[in-house]
Image (cartoon, grey):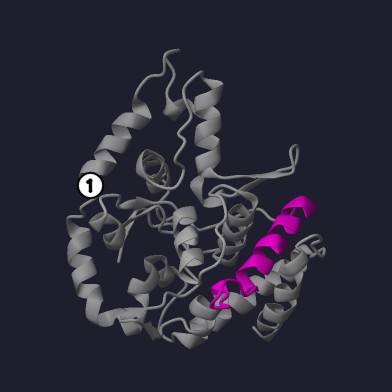
Amino acid sequence: MKKLVSLAFAAGIAMVGASAVQAISEAEIKKDIEEFQGFFLKRFPGLTLEDFSDGVNALPQYAHRRANWEINMEFPQFEPEMDKAAEEWAAPFQNGKSLADCDLAPAQNYPVFDAASGDLRTVEGDINACLKANGEEVIKNVKRGKMARLVAHYKSQFNGEKMAVDYSDPGAQAWYEKGRQFYWAKRGQLNFSCADCHVHNSGNSARGDVLSAGLGHGVGFPVWRTKWQVAGKPWGTIHRRYGGCNNQVRADGFKAQGEEYKALEFYESVMNTGVPLKVPSLRQ
């Protein structure tokens, strides 16, 4: 973990220019995964890799709230919305096909590096690409609402499958390094990095809330969040959450499904190699 922590300083410098990304090997990425996961398994003894799929609810510091979360998960508020998503997924396009006919990758493999374009494919991007290819209108809001609901429906079919993102291609490794720099670089008026909250202070309290561990991030998204529900918009993709974190540290925002957040999603997904999907979930 010392190697990853040392990235905080280096990444901070790199993000100022953000022009070039150093090459990284597949072996180095495997070492990163080992160190990242090992840090959290040591920080929270008694938890297994699989336990982290419950997010903050898995942490012992959150034990006083877990019982309430478990009760809510027995009859989750999102059930009617998931039924609606299943209907939307099967609804026929004008050409007779449906989203069920889309050629999507297994959920545990996203984001997927596309060597032909050099870009990262996300579930949200592939759904919109399928809609466009079939002459349907794309979903403009890729952070919440219908898109989040549809992604939750798709990913839920792969629950229990362990994250296994392919980073073997040099192009994928370049995306990984961009995401790694983003994760460890400080930003905003508060001068915080993702790691400040979700690595160094994971399990600690902040304004009455417990800071979640970086291990497990993303495997439960899209989520139905209580805070968002109060505003009438309970669904959120991982990029919506990234945007919220950026706002909280008073940093300039980035576009959902833009390069910065796709790289960050790729990095976090790789760090969660072996953690099973558990979609959707309730989060505070």
Mark 1 lies on residue: 79
Q: Is residue 104 visible?
A: no
User: Which residue is more in the foreground, 261 or 66?
Assistant: 261
Instruction: Give the amino acid at mark 1.
Output: Glu
Secondary structure at badge 1 equals helix
Residue 88, position as x, y percentages in the image: 33, 30
Residue 261, position as x, y percentages in the image: 58, 55
Residue 245: in magenta span: no
Q: Residue at x 56, y 83 (%)?
A: 39
Q: Is residue 177 visible?
A: yes
Q: Quadrant of the C terminus?
A: bottom left
- Residue 240's place in the image compared with 38, above or below, is above
In this picture, residue 56 sits left or right of residue 78: right
User: Which residue is more in the foreground, 73 or 204?
Assistant: 204
- Residue 131's place in the image compared with 51, above or below, is above
Residue 59, position as x, y percentages in the image: 37, 79
Residue 121, position as x, y percentages in the image: 61, 43
In this picture, residue 82 sits left or right of residue 192: left
User: Which residue is more in the foreground, 122 or 39?
Assistant: 122
Would you call the spot at circle 1 few (<14 residues within 10 Å), some (14-19), or many (20 or more)?
A: few
Q: Residue at x 68, y 86 (%)?
A: 2
**Which residues lie in the magenta part?**
168-194
Residue 265 image-quadrant placement:
bottom right
Residue 81 image-quadrant placement:
top left
Q: Quadrant of the N terminus?
A: bottom right
Residue 169: in magenta span: yes
Residue 76 image-quadrant placement:
bottom left
How many callouts does the rendering have?
A: 1
Q: Residue at x 19, y 71 (%)?
A: 68
